[in-house]
Every structure is written in C-alpha cells, then in structure tokens.
Amino acid sequence: MLKKITINNLALIKNLEIEFDGNLNIFSGETGAGKSIIVDSLMLLIGARYDKTLLKYGEEKGFVEGVFECDCTIAESFGIDCEDGILIVSRKFFKDGRNEIRVNGKQITTSMLREIMSSYVDIYGQNEYQSLLKVSEQRKLLDYYVFGKDVTPLTKQRELYNEYKKLRADMLSLGDERARAQRIDILEYQIGEIERVDVKDGEEQSLVDRRHVLMSAERIKNALGGCYAALEADEGAGSSVSEALRDLAQISSLDSSYQALYDRLRSVSIELDDITESVKDGIDRFGDSDAELDKIEARLEKIRAIKSKYGAFDAMTKFLASAKHELERLRGGEEEYAELCKREAKLKTELFSSCDALSDMRRKGAVTMAKRIVDELADLGMAGSKFEAVFSDKPDIDNFTGKVDSTGFDECEFFLSPNLGQPLMPLSKIISGGEMSRFMLSVKLITGDLGGIDTMIFDEIDTGISGAVGLSVAKKLCKLSRNRQVLCVTHLPQIAAMADSHFFIEKHDEGDETVTTVTPLDRHGKVGEIARLSGTKDVSATSIKNAEEMKDWSDKFKADL
C-alpha cells in the first residue's frame, strides 16, 4: 500500500507531504481547490505521461515521491533491490519536458514503471471510463475476471498462435511448386551475376588509386625517364660513383679510414644500382597506360553496377551466402513444403481446439460475471438492471484462421439495460455518468481480489449520484477498504463519513501566488466537512448535529464489518 507521498512544485502545490491510512482515505474540498492535482501526482507514480504544463509556474524542476509497502517480487524481476518490502518511487520533472524515474534508486523507463506499478495500484478515473467503452478493453476485462492469476490457457494460446504464424510465414517463403521454380530462376541469376563479377575485398579502392596514377602517366614517365638518364648516362651518377670506387680501391688497404670510405661508397653504389633498376621497372609499367586505364574503367563500371544492386562488398557477400542457402533449400523444397503442410494441418487443429476451449471458458465465466455485476448494481440502486457479455458466433475449423489472434477468435461486447423495460444495448450507447460510476464500482468490487492489488484509487466515483445511492456506494467503498487500501476523491457526505483518514484540499493566496494545501482532519474537522458537503453548514442550526449522527452511524457500520 501507499504509505506516504511527497510533492514538490506540481501545479499549485509548492511543498506537500501526506501520510496515508491502510484502509479508506478520503479527499474532499471546494471545486477547483486542486483535488485533481493529488490524482495527477498519484498517476505520475504509476507511469502516467509527464506533461510539462504540470510544473508549477516559474519553477525549473519538480518532484514526486511515493513510499509503498508491498510484495517486491515483481519489482525485483526488473533488477530492483528491495529491502523490508519497501518501494520508493521517485519522479523528477523539468521545465523542458524531461523527467527522470527511479525505483529504490534504480533509474527505469516510463513503460517499466507502468508494468511494475500495475501490480500494486489500480486507479479509476475519466481515462478508465473512456477505456471501458472500447470493445477491445471489455474483452480484456472479461479475461481478467475469467482467468485471474491463472493465465496458463492464454499463454498456451499465444504460443500456439505464434508458432502457427511462423509456420505460415515459412510456407509462404517456400511457396508452391510454381512459386519455387520462379524463385529458383531469380536466385540462380543473382548468384551467377555476382560470381561472374567476382569482386574482391578492397578491389574498388585499389583500382581507383591505380586510375589516379595512370591519369598522370605522361608526367610520371617523363620524370622517371629523366631520372633514369641522369643515373645511366656516360657521365651520370652511376658512372661517377663507379669511378670513385676504383680510385678508393687503390688506397683502401693503406689505412682503415680509407677502407671505411670505400665500404660506404660501395653501399651507395649498390643502392644506386637498385634505384636505377626500380626506375626502369617503373617506366616499363607505363608501357601502354591508355589501354590499362581503359581496362580499369571497364572493371570499375562492372563493380559499381553490381554494387548498386547488391550493396558494398560485405553486404554483397552476405546476400550471396543467403541466396545460396535459400537456393539449396528451394531445390529440395518439395519435400519440405509437404512436411510443412502436414505440420500446418496438425497445428491448425491444436490452435482451433485452444481457441474453442478459451471461448467456452469465457462464455461460462461471462454468465457468472454478469450475475455478480447485476447483484452489485442492485445494491447500488440499479435493481432493474440487466447485463450481458454478447459474443460473436463461433467460427468453424475451416474458416477460423482469418479471425484468430494471440488471444483466440472471440469477439465480445458488454451490453447493459440500466432500467426495467429497456432492451439490452451496447454499454457505450446508453450509460449515463451516474450509471457508469456505479457500473465501474461494481466491476472493481468483483475484480479487486483477482490481481491482489494493494491500493485502489477512485477519482470522483460519485459522479451523477446522490441520496440513498450515495450511501450504497459509501458502504461498498468501506467494505472494499477493509482488506485493501482505498483512496477516494469525493463530493458526497455519505462517502466522506466513512473515512478512516480524511484530507481537506483548499487553495489560498500566499503573497503574490496561489497555492494548494492538504490538511488532515481530526474528528471535529471531519464532522465540519461532512456538514459542508451536505450543503447545510452555516445554513441549518442542526447541520453539525446531523453530520455528527452520520459520522457515528458510519463508525458503527465499520465496527460491525
């Protein structure tokens, strides 16, 4: 359950800390006082999207933190350390729209926060109202009621469907005999085209470099020719060095220094001979530079043409390997396709059986769910109501595959008749605000135990109701709060009277700004707020007495539970 929440710079709240009771916590206050801000804070803690307009005007950053006492198994599955069953969820948010989420110090994403907190907190507000009007959400709610924590049948269905979908994809990729023959022709052409060009790794760059050299061939040949002539001429460098060597040879034996000079010059002579030979080879390589340049251009054209179709060397190599593998598979595809057809027939039967079994469980569970909802609605002043989950006709095995998904082939929609004499009609067509509030409360009452949710939040569950119906809602919320924590924003005195902890929300001016504050009420304050909500405070002399009587009656009701 939620032990404490701390709020800083959110909307009209500057700094606020609230500690909660483990049972029924009530929030009330004048319209516009900021009750929705408290709900927004709670929503942020369970993964709602942060909107930068929530930040208090003029501030750079804000902060919301909640301390939860709970079974940490799910949080630990996300790698979150948890000691003594405590989760501390914090959310920093900034003026530029950024926000940072941490659970017990570990930074996580919004989607991770939603997944974790959905196991600990359930909230009903206007978003949930709209969500339940969607047919897809109605089926999810039915599944939650029917299967509860034992999702084995749904898991089996999802696995079978994914296997069947993959099998069908394999069959499609392999194709029938005609499709295989066409694909084989294409692959053989592509493989041959790549292998004929036979591109080598790094070849294109090598050719580009050589082309660059050849485009300067005339200048290079002239330079190398001049160099060669200078080295090989009768009075060139080579001849001069040879003559110097002959002179030194005559005196090299007379002194070690002469011998050293001779050895050094001999090395120069050898190096000079090697350079001369290299220069000559360089000249020879440019024997027909124009023809070589033409060949390079033609080769580059082939490489770039094949590259434009199959990618650079790495991509081309990968494509070639994949094409050869596919070709090999297709050449033996007749037997494989026949085997896939056998598997498809078997798996189709299993998938249909799974869908059929799920449908039977849903239809049976829907009857029980309908009876419980009608019973709850009767207690909430809608005794003439009828409710039914209406299913589409079951398809047969020959035509069900186009209607199946990972959850089965059922389509169902909630139908309600809120009054005697009215026909059953889709929920979205006929339900009013007050009826929807009571319907949602009925749903929460019958599904509350299924998921083991510790904390349930109701944002104005009393919309459109009053009087005796309001008292019925108050009783239901009170009963619900005996074995879990309930937080409720209300305008009804009957609900406020049931509070174990009551928080009064108001806004007032502080200097040049308006701020929202939350005040925990003692018994005297609770009675005064009940009188205010009744509309008789400062009007009737007996308003406080009546509020006292309502509070006493509520306390006795709770004590008798």
Image: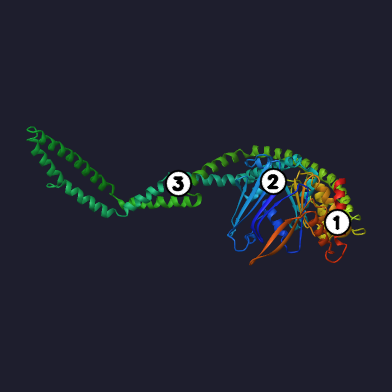
Q: Amino acid at mark 1?
A: Glu
Query: What residue is disc 3 on?
Result: 197
C-beta proximity under 8 Å, tags 2 and 1? no
**Distance of label 1 from label 3 (alpha carbons):** 96 Å
Mark 3 touches mark 2? (CB < 8 Å): no
- Pick the residue in front: 342 or 507: 507
Q: Residues within 10 Å of mark 2 (few under 14, many from 20)?
A: many
Nearer the observer, 3 or 520: 520
Q: Earlier in the sequence, mark 1 or mark 3?
A: 3
| Foreground: disc 3 or disc 2 | 2
Q: Name the residue that disc number 2 marks.
A: 68
Q: CA distance from mark 2 to mark 1?
A: 33 Å
Tell which circle, 3 or 2, labels the residue nearer the N-terminal end. Answer: 2
Dot 1 lies on which element? helix
Report the residue that reaches farthest toward the top. Answer: 253
For label 1, count other residues whose C-alpha is less than 10 Å away and answer few (under 14), some (14-19) or many (20+): many
| Residue 133 image point, x, y percent | 78, 57
- Horizontal arrangement in the rendering, residue 526 relative to residue 172 (left or right): right
The spot of residue 340 in percent (x, y) is: 68, 39
Q: What amino acid type is highlighted by mark number 2?
A: Phe
Q: Report the side of 74 relative to 482 (left or right).
A: left
- Is the Cβ of the residue at disc 1 closer than 8 Å to that at disc 3? no
Provide residue 547's location: percent of width, then percent of height: 85, 58
Which SS class for mark 2? strand
Q: Which residue is mark 1?
A: 548
In front of the other: 39 or 499: 499
